[in-house]
Amino acid sequence: MRSGMGALMRGVVTMAVALFLNVQANAAEVLREATIGEPPPLDVMVTTADVAAVIGRHIFETLYALDSTYSPRPLLAESDRVDEGGKTIVIKLRQGVLFHNGKELTAADVVASMKRWGQFGARGKLLMGNAVSVEATDRYEVTLKLSAPNGAWKTLIADVNGGLAIYPEEIVSKAGAQPIEQKDYIGTGPYKFKEWRPNRYVELEKFDRYSSRKEAGDGFAGARVANFDAIRFVPVPDVGTRVSGVQAGDYDYAEMISGDLFDQLSADKSIHVVRSNAPIFGLFFMNSKEGILKDNYKLRRAIQMALDKSQAQRVAFGPKGLWDAQGSIFPQGSFWYSTAGTEAYSQHDAKKAKELAKEAGYTGTPIRLLVSTNYQAHFDEATVFTRQLAEAGINVQMMVVDWATLLKMRAQSEQWDIYVTHHGFQPDPILLTFLNPTYPGWWDNPEINALRTELTNSSDQTARKAAWEKIQALFYEQVPAMKVGDAYTYDIASPKLKGLNPNGPAFWNVSAK
């Protein structure tokens, strides 16, 4: 009798604790996003991984931000002027902006961030490679002097993805090439870092002292209002689990859903489909540093010649409305759209590819293709291409790993010959990763270096467009990477979420019904 009473009391206590925890959870409004997997470190300055940028853009901010038309508008900056024909850039900062540690943002923080970005940032050398000096010329004024004009300077510093995120001087001045530690995840954004439980979640909490811009929110620009107490980013590698989780109410938002589910989910009233405004495009990077493909442009062209890109996109993305097999790096309607070199985009000629590979000295050595299943489209495209290349006598060995492992391995040139990723739409070609000589793939030779300088060191858009067309032609001649095609990806969300950002997952200005 006594033990039965004890069991009963323990049950009552357990129920009471569970009820208390549920009340606590309901009291705090938490948005839960299912991501494609565990992110790399959230030091967004030194990585271009989308999964890090999606989380990091809530913590860290930039001097400018891209609006819904992908034009840069002031964020931490208040105003700017350009002198000496574009060689001197003076940026005035907003006053009263606070970091998450309570310290006010000043020019010293921006200067220190620019110096580290220029030396170690994923995209920093694209601007800072020509920097003569950068200094604080007032408490809220930064002056950057360049050896040559840069027509894309404002766009280059308007995105956290590998970009000029602004960190406190005392943190960033001590940081080197290695990612900063979690305790130093301190920015000026509407949410601040709270905790990271590996393989469980990354949680951010609302920053109550956030200083928002007054303009209406537009893309990533304008006002940023935190309507949730916290955001929890949960790694969910399996796409089916991400979908069922939103349907069941376990997640409020899930990213990168496979194309074969598009029609079904579009008809599901318990799901809101969030289709991207701008296309991404798959990229198969060639190893330009070492291995069988180094400097062997003829073998690279043979590999591309064997492929039917439309078949790969059909398998990866499903309905025709979600993809477009076209070879221009930029989509039609963009200022940068060009057909230069695109006759080589998707020839699908196994016989000619086999002959060209033989001319290139290829004898059947396995070509190592590094791919992850976290992005289902990557794996689908790699599977289709491996089969098509086999028909041309080109032997591909797929190495399938998780995304976090791929990010580590792609930095090690001896580990792979080709790896699979994708690129988001960019408003300026200088932001394309394959144009960065330090980005894994390492396209770095006199021809591309000269054209990259021609593209960068001008503020005349007509001249820059002509330089870009020459670069795209060289892209198809030297094949540093292969474009698969344009794809309009989609995420899914609970219908209760309002104000979702069409430029990508960003949860300021978002609210629940």
Image: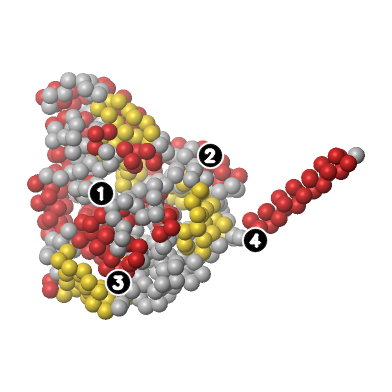
Q: Is residue 354 left or right of residue 203?
A: left
Name the disc covering residue 241, or none: 2
Could you say whether the residue bearing mark 2 is in a helix, strand or loop? helix
Residue placed at 30% from the left, 68% from the top? 110
Inter-mark Cα distance, 4 to 1: 43 Å
Closer to the eye: label 3 or 1: 3
Inter-mark Cα distance, 1 to 2: 31 Å
Residue marked by disc 4: 27
Q: Earlier in the sequence, mark 3 or mark 1?
A: 3
Inter-mark Cα distance, 3 to 1: 29 Å
Residue marked by disc 1: 433
Closer to the eye: label 3 or 2: 3
User: In the figure, 227 relative to 203: above or below?
Assistant: below
Q: Earlier in the sequence, mark 1 or mark 2?
A: 2
Based on the displayed image, in which of its 4 quarters is residue 483 positioned? top left
Q: Are marks 3 and 1 in contact (CB under 8 Å)?
A: no
| Nearer to me, 6 or 297 | 6
Could you say whether the residue bearing mark 3 is in a helix, strand or loop? helix
At which x and y percent is residue 89? Answer: 20, 71
Instruction: Tell me which amino acid carries mark 4.
Output: Ala
Mark 1 surroundings: few (<14), some (14-19) or many (≥20) residues within 10 A: some
User: In the figure, 287 relative to 54: above or below?
Assistant: above
